[in-house]
Amino acid sequence: MTDEAKHDQAEAVAAPDVSATQQVSIVMEDIRALVRAEMRYYQSRLDYSRHVMRTSFRFGAVAAFAFGAAAIGLVTGLIMTLAPLVGPGLATLLVTFGFMTIGAICAFQARKWVRKIYFPEIERDNDATPERSQGNGT
């Protein structure tokens, strides 16, 4: 088959003539469909994150209440046990400091776990900001 025959065959298969207005209209429809798909995607990601946070909060609230009640009993028992050995003031300070330390450790762990919820697209966008590109580690 010669080049001329191939050219004639390609012209026969070519797309029908579409005006510029119709082409712009088709492109706009495609853009609208893309935007709707992106919005549905981000809505589903938001719904998932909301579900995770709501469930985490519920379990955390119940745990905080249960541990709070247990801590009251434990603190009372520890102070009563240590008071004859070191005095009531020092016993109270020791128990308070110990529980504050435990609370701080648990708070940092909770913050670490909450940071696991992220949108990779947002992280990718943040990488392009000047603060990130300078390598200051923020």
Image (cartoon, rainbow, N blue to C red):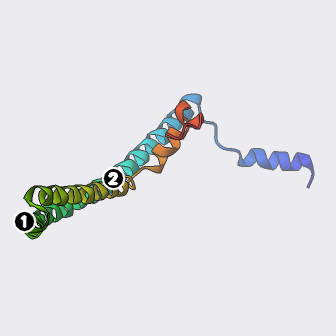
At a point 53% along the width and 41% down the height, the residue shown is 137
Screen quadrant of the N terminus? bottom right
The residues bearing labels 1 and 2 have C-alpha atoms spaced at a distance of 29 Å
Mark 2 falls on what kind of element? helix
Residue 65: name its quadrant: bottom left
Amino acid residing under circle 1: Thr
From the viewer's perspective, is 11 left or right of 58? right
Q: Is residue 25 above or below residue 39?
A: above
Neighbours of disc 1 within 10 Å: few (<14), some (14-19), many (20+): few
> Residue 33: percent from the left, percent from the top?
44, 44
What's the residue at 37%, 53% (across, down)?
Answer: 45
Out of 78 and 126, give the one closest to the viewer: 78
Q: Residue 114: x percent and y percent?
A: 34, 54
Residue in the foreground of this view, choosing between 57 and 69: 69
User: In the image, residue 82 lies at what x, y percent?
Assistant: 12, 67
Q: Is residue 134 above or below residue 115?
A: above
Amino acid type, label 2 = Arg
| Residue 90 visible, this angle | yes
Q: Is residue 38 above or below residue 90?
A: above
Task: Locate residue 65 relative to residue 106 in the image: left or right.
Answer: left
Residue assigned mark 2: 111
Q: Which label was assigned to residue 76?
A: 1
**Visible residue check, residue 57:** no
Q: Position of residue 120 (x, y in %)?
A: 47, 50
Q: What residue is shown at x 84% (from left), y 45% (from top)?
A: 7
Q: Which of the two residues, 19 or 134, is positioned nearer the viewer here?
A: 134
**Occupied quadrant, residue 72:** bottom left
Q: Earlier in the sequence, mark 1 or mark 2?
A: 1
SS assignment at label 1:
helix
